[in-house]
Amino acid sequence: MSTRIPLTRRWRSKTFDEIIGQDIAVRLIKNSLYRGFFFPVYLFAGQRGCGKTTMGRVFAAAINCAELQAFQADPVAKKLPCGSCNSCSAMARGEHPDFLEIDAASHTGVDNVRQIIESASFLPIMGRKK
């Protein structure tokens, strides 16, 4: 038995180079990764279907990728996320313990926000960041 994966997930971009139409956002985030400077919060905003979730997923995979230091040494030769390390493989399978994706449109209650704050207060398990 194989599980059916929606087309939006099957064909979603998995690296920064595959993201189309968001050149400035990709450049800003890659520069942040290159410099090793991360803000406490990133807000992805825009119309439906513009790539907010895709950018967030690729960014989360890149932050925890084992090849991040190699990318910081030579960003032209090394691509992020690598897709082959343990962290990237767990992200691709949807099993990364440090990655939590939340649909903000339907999780607006106080209890939902408390749950987010509580889960964010724990240290990462597999990656560098949560």
Image (tube, grey):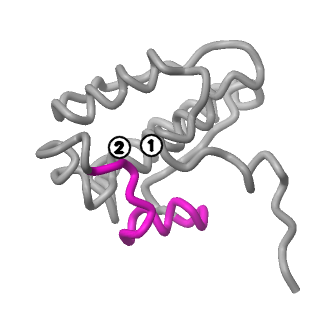
Q: Which residues are magenta?
A: 78-95
Residue 125 in the image: above or below residue 68: below
Q: Disc 2 marks which amino acid?
A: Ser
Residue 66 drawn at (x, y percent): 27, 61
Give the numbered dot on residue 121. Answer: 2
**Marks 1/2: CA distance?**
5 Å
Is residue 69 placed above or below 1 in the rendered structure? Answer: above
Pointer 2: residues within 10 angstroms few (<14), some, or many (20+)?
few
The residue closer to the viewer here, 82 or 41, is 82
Along the line of sight, which residue is nearer the eye, 103 or 84? 84
Residue 102 image offset from top left, x and y in percent: 63, 38
Q: Is 110 left, or right, of 62 in this rendering?
A: right
Secondary structure under tag 2 reads loop
Q: Is 24 on the left or on the right of 65, as rendered?
A: right
The quadrant holding residue 44 is: top right
Mark 1 highlights which residue? 118
Proximity of marks 1 and 2: CB atoms separated by less than 8 Å: yes
Q: Identify which residue is drawn at 33% across, 56% down.
A: 65
Instruction: Report if residue 80 lies within the magenta region.
Output: yes
